[in-house]
Amino acid sequence: MKAERLLEAFGQLEEQYIEEAAPDAHKAMRLSKARKNAAAAAALLLIFAGVFGTAMVASAGFRQMVLSFFHIGQVESAPDHNGDAFHISKADIGGLVKAEYVQLGDSYYDSGFGTLYQVDRKENGEIGSVRFWAIEDGNAIALKTQKNSFSANWQGNSYQGDLYWCTNDGSLSLYWDEDFHGLSETNYWFAHSVSGRTDVALLYLSQGKQRDYAQYPLLYHLDTGEVEDILQGTGAEALSFVYDCQWSDDLSKVILTCRDANDGMASYFCDVAAKSLVRLPTLTGVETERAIFADDDTLLLVQATEDWSTCSVFSYDLTVAALTQTLCQEKIFEEYRDFSMENYGMMFFGGRYGLYVDPTGILSVVDLKTGDKTPVNNFTFDPRGGFLSNFSNTKLLYSVSETLSEESPSISQLGVLNLESKTFTVFDRKDNENLEELSISWFDDDRVQIDNSQSDTYALYLYQF
């Protein structure tokens, strides 16, 4: 289970693969939503997990500064629902946080990448239409929905389906119907957006379940409907049981992780532009369980001990083929529900930056590329708290739950650790016993969302720090 636990900690284990992995680290409270897609991938509650994408570029100043911590004195009191759909009220919290309370009435709306969307179905359950809205400056703005139909073949199976999408402020929102794509339970497809692009999406064809699970990526051109085999000619198309793909931001490189014949993991580095494929240990000279991109030209290589208690990290510069060890046998943070148990160690998010909690609760931001640790001034970690990265790995959502219940998390503190401005801002929330909070996540790269319900009505609360 070492490999699965390492993947889970780094936030890169597909849901199909998690089904048989022991979820004994970084517990997640998941959204009570039927869909499992890229737009909803960020909506995991209180999880120390990753995102699809790469992190920001480091500055020399970042490594030399202490991050500032601000605990806002004003306590937020969330409003009751008024039942009116798209009624939006605003609030200012301590002059540092802008809140928008979006009432949704008795209809349920899903969300992802800065949009709300709702699916209208026919009597037989098939999709009639998909509608998207943006929330901007206190208004709900209807967006134009596009629909593409595609067909593709892989491993002797035919895949087809409809992909609904819209663009908003340079981001792409996607929706597809998992119940009506005409495939079996073990043969299906899903999609991911590509960072910074609205003209293409990554389309994944998948087969099997659990240990037989495999996937294959295609590049889908939304403007033309063309399905491009982006890995063709690299040798990657011949790999068996690929279950994870981690792309560089420009899609010129990809790390492919497979299950090997001995039920272990085998990772490959594929240079898409150069049409080459090589085992990661051959490329880097380091046996590693996992590799991720710190940026387009740097790999982070992770080694964990057999009991998964500690790990080491190496930085590999692809441009000059240079290897540097940045962390050595650091304890890995593992969440305990028994708050009396002492816990400390490294938290990972699937990108360049992680967090380190020392035995006294002092929190530091860790640049995994360099190994530099930057402490957060005047902050002590609460064991009831958790962090979640935004899509670009520039900000970390912090929340404290009084109950850690998956049914009603009761979020008592909310904050954002901003890696760009080097600030950490937190405010307290007053418990509203009339509201049932369903989930907390990133709405887009800058706004945090909390979904809640009250007396069969729904609302979405948005916070910009």
Image (cartoon, rainbow, N blue to C red):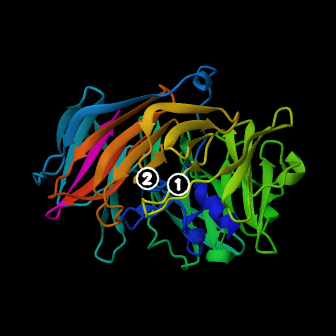
Q: Give the residue displayed 83% in from the left and 47% down from the top.
A: 275
Q: Is residue 324 shown left or right of residue 412? A: right
- SS at badge 1: loop
Magenta span contains residue 462: yes
Task: Give the labeled residue for mark 2.
Answer: 383
Q: Nearer the viewer, residue 92 or 220?
A: 92
Quarter of the picture holding the C terminus: top left
**Residue 117 visible:** yes
Residue 6, quarter of the rendered image: bottom right
Q: Which three-letter amino acid code belongs to the residue tagged 1?
A: Asn
Per the rendered image, the range of residues in magenta is 454-465
Q: Position of residue 98 (x, y in %)?
A: 27, 32
Above or below for 29 versus 76: below
Q: Position of residue 37 (x, y in %)?
A: 48, 59
Counting other residues with Cα less than 10 Å from the Cα at mark 1, is it few (<14), some (14-19), or many (20 or more)?
some
Task: Give the labeled residue for mark 1.
Answer: 343
Q: Give the residue displayed 55% in from the left and 50% down from the top.
A: 344
Q: Position of residue 437 (x, y in %)?
A: 27, 57
Q: Residue furthest left?
A: 82
Q: Are marks 2 and 1 in contact (CB under 8 Å)?
A: yes
Residue 332, quarter of the rendered image: bottom right
- SS at badge 2: loop
Quarter of the picture holding the N terminus: bottom right
State how far apart marks 2 and 1 are (Cα).
8 Å
Magenta span contains residue 43: no
Counting other residues with Cα less than 10 Å from the Cα at mark 2, is it few (<14), some (14-19), or many (20 or more)?
some
